[in-house]
Amino acid sequence: QVQLVESGGGSVQVGNSLRLSCASSGGTNGIRAMGWFRQAPGKEREFVGAVWWSAGSIFYADSVKGRFVISRDKSRNSVYLQMNNLEPEDTAIYYCGADRNLILSSIRRVDQYDYWGQGTQVTVSS
């Protein structure tokens, strides 16, 4: 069973930056993808970005491309989300997700991830 723990959320003003971390443990061998998702109040959880673990390829949602950067530490089975130039629309609970079975073409699909962290709140105010 994979456990995921996010950290690094908080409240910032527009234009500022935050860095989120996701540490994984327990059965992380065979992870195919690990990434970030977010859920704003009243909205469905959406894909932010993810790493295809074996190759290190990184995929982003169009809404964050150019502002957010995902990185990973393979030795620690951890992923990070550097969020720059934050906007009020980025306000959400950010979740780390991972899966051992999904295929590459499904990397953006929220419903294909089996393991989730508890989430960390990010609030951006103007």
Image (cartoon, rainbow, N blue to C red):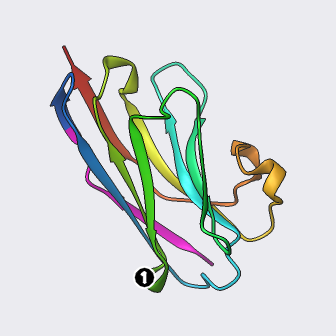
* 109 drawn magenta: no
Q: Secondary structure at mark 1?
A: helix
Image quadrant for the N terminus? Answer: bottom right
Q: Residue at x 21, y 25 (%)?
A: 15
The residue where tag 1 is placed is: 76
The answer to whether residue 112 shows anywhere in this view is yes
Q: Residue furthest front?
A: 66
Is 7 drawn above or below residue 101 in the view shown? above
Dividing the picture into quarters, in which one does residue 102 lie? bottom right
* 4 drawn magenta: yes
Is 2 drawn above or below residue 120 in the view shown? below
The stretch of residues the image draws in magenta is 1-10
Q: Main secondary structure of the magenta part?
A: strand
Is 84 drawn above or below residue 9 in the view shown? above
Q: Position of residue 2 (x, y in %)?
A: 58, 75
Q: Amino acid at mark 1?
A: Arg
Q: Residue furthest top?
A: 126
Q: Position of residue 17 (x, y in %)?
A: 22, 39
Q: Position of residue 116 (x, y in %)?
A: 56, 58
The local crowd at label 1, few if under 14, some if 14 to 19, many if 20 or more residues have their Cα within 10 Å, is few
Dividing the picture into quarters, in which one does residue 87 lie? top left
> Front-most of 81 and 122?
81
105 left or right of 65 in image: right
Q: Residue at x 45, y 68 (%)?
A: 72
